[in-house]
Image (cartoon, rainbow, N blue to C red):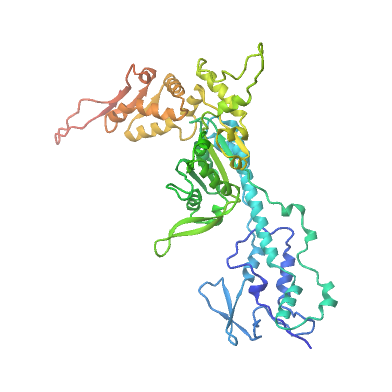
């Protein structure tokens, strides 16, 4: 006596509706998947009547009829006998097999560095480290996604004989042929055929950008966002507070990332979060002697722990539900790269103290690092000594600065930034794309005039910016102040050119204007209308 077993497709292929396509792993052969689909169109026992994947109901054995839907991609089948409805997901499986998405072209570290060179002057070490970090982020995301999706497919494709046993035992039947024919039916997914590298999940390595103010930490991160194919969110740590207090929660950084990803959760889970002013959440040095809770410092650090390591967080999507409540979604942060940036003012003293050599007794050699930041030396010498110390910074120095060890351990890469000298500041004014000088020249072109600077004027601007100790940020402040009068005089005037020299920067002279010259206007004898003629000097 033969017994017919019917299996609904929605239970055999539990891939879900609109399942994303991906590059199928070598261990998941197309032939094996077709075997599962072909097996579903044959009989479960040896001599029984064959059943088809879209013809018979698994509940009552009645005939299935297709249901017309608005979306032609979704196929549903209805059994009129027991009023059951089944969904077919074989089409999605065919798309996974026949139309895999090809790997995208990844910019290698050299290409990323070349792109940064167009906009960022100096900081060669930082650009190389960040380029490698971003490139590895690309590879890690693609590898881990392929692993996760392959695991989901392998979990949904089980041995057909085991499916028959499950449904036969549920309906009260026993398949006696298993004991004899089980050896001929080999499992489709065999663990012995897996490569050792398929189970490896690559962990992320978060980055800390360490350097003085105004050396390009934020600028280089904004420039990276132009070349990246992943969303990037720039967040200010000074506004973050511990949950339950006035201010922004740490989950708000994920909300910004989701908004920049246009609401695409899967794309947001591959993004990069840039934490600006990362040093401002360091705990105060005298916190241990007080009973107050540091909600903006150590409290924020504890809240960032799981986000930086990897967790599923409930994030506000920015959309409002019925009733005015905020809609929340879940985001997995295991593949989100976190980049912290901060000046860490005073950390050079912590580093110098670590290299401090102490001697007991008289006649010992003088401490070399005792006057490492002596104010009696020149400004250039101070910057050089500070840069050498920052190059030696490690995680222990960050802990002594006020960061908790648990958070520092989640940022294994420390990228040092060096100070700018006079020649570098001059290059920043002229060379990069979208430079400050090009911006001001474009503005004066809108006024109807040309703006030029002499070489000694640019060097004087760089010298003044160097003395202000605020890095490249001082360049804009100086130029805006120098050009205040010209911004007032030039618009809608007869001035065609403005030249700025060193005396103008020092306040000893004024701009050199070139104006239009109006010649005597000839008279038109026919209608007595004066016609102006413009002659440039």
From the top left corner, tell me how far across and down residue 390 is, in percent. Answer: 58, 28
Question: Could you say which quadrant of the image residue 30 lies in?
Answer: bottom right
Question: Could you say which quadrant of the image residue 112 lies in?
Answer: top right
Residue at x-position 63% and y-position 24%? 355
Q: Is residue 39 above or below residue 380?
A: below
Residue at x-position 57% and y-position 20%? 372
**Front residue (pair 59, 377):** 377
Question: Could you say which quadrant of the image residue 412 lies in?
Answer: top right
* Residue 468 at least partly seen: yes
From the top left corner, tell me how far across and down residue 304 is, in percent. Answer: 55, 46
**Front residue (pair 186, 369):** 369
Task: Please state if 104 lies on the left or on the right of 504 as rendered.
Answer: right
Which quadrant is home to the C terminus?
top left
Which quadrant is home to the N terminus?
bottom right
Q: Is residue 359 above or below residue 73?
A: above
Task: Please state if 456 lies on the left or on the right of 357 as rendered.
Answer: left
**Front residue (pair 521, 86):** 86
């Amino acid at each position: 006596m033969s017994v017919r077993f019917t299996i609904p497709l929605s239970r055999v292929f539990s891939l879900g509706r609109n399942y994303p396509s991906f590059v199928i792993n070598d261990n998941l052969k197309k032939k094996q998947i077709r075997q599962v689909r072909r097996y579903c169109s044959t009989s479960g026992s040896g001599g029984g009547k064959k059943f088809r994947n879209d013809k018979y109901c698994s509940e009552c054995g009645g005939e299935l009829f297709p249901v017309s839907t608005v979306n032609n991609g979704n196929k549903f089948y209805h059994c009129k006998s027991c009023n059951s409805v089944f969904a077919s997901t074989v089409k999605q499986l065919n798309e996974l097999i026949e139309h895999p998405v090809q790997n995208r072209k990844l910019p290698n570290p050299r290409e990323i560095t070349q792109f940064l060179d167009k906009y960022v002057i100096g900081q060669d070490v930082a650009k190389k480290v960040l380029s490698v970090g971003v490139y590895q982020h690309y590879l890690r995301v693609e590898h881990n996604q392929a692993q996760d999706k392959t695991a989901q497919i392998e979990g949904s494709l089980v041995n057909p004989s085991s499916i028959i046993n499950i449904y036969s035992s549920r309906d009260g039947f026993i398949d006696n042929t298993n004991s004899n024919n089980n050896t001929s039916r080999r499992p489709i997914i065999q663990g012995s055929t897996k490569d050792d590298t398929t189970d490896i999940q690559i962990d992320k390595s978060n980055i800390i950008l360490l350097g003085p103010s105004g050396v390009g930490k934020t600028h280089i991160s904004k420039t990276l966002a132009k070349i990246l194919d992943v969303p990037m969110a720039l967040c200010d740590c000074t506004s973050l507070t511990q949950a339950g207090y006035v201010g922004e929660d740490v989950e708000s950084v994920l909300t910004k990332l989701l908004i920049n990803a246009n609401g695409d959760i899967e794309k947001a889970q591959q993004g990069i979060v840039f934490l600006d002013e990362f040093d401002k959440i360091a705990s105060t040095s005298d916190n241990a002697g007080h009973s107050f809770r540091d909600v903006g410092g150590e409290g924020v650090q504890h809240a960032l722990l799981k986000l930086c390591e990897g967790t599923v967080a409930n994030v506000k999507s920015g959309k409002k539900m019925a009733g005015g409540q905020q809609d929340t979604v879940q985001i997995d942060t295991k593949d989100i790269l976190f980049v912290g940036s901060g000046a860490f003012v005073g950390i050079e003293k912590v580093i110098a103290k670590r290299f401090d050599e102490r001697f007991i007794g008289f006649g010992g050699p003088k401490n070399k690092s005792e006057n490492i930041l002596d104010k009696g030396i020149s400004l250039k010498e101070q910057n050089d000594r500070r840069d050498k110390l920052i190059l030696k910074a490690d995680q222990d120095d960050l802990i002594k600065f006020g960061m908790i060890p648990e958070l520092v351990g989640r940022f294994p890469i420390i990228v040092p930034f060096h100070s700018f000298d006079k020649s570098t500041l001059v290059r920043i004014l002229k060379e990069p794309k979208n430079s400050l000088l090009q911006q001001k020249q474009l503005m004066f072109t809108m006024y109807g005039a040309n703006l030029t600077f002499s070489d000694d004027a640019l060097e004087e601007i760089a010298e003044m910016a160097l003395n202000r100790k605020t890095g490249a940020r001082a360049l804009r402040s100086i130029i805006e102040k120098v050009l205040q009068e010209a911004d007032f005089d030039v618009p809608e005037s007869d001035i065609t050119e403005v030249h700025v020299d060193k005396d103008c920067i020092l306040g000893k002279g004024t701009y050199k204007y070139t104006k239009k010259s109006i010649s005597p206007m000839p008279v038109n004898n026919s209608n007595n209308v004066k016609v102006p003629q413009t002659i440039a000097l």
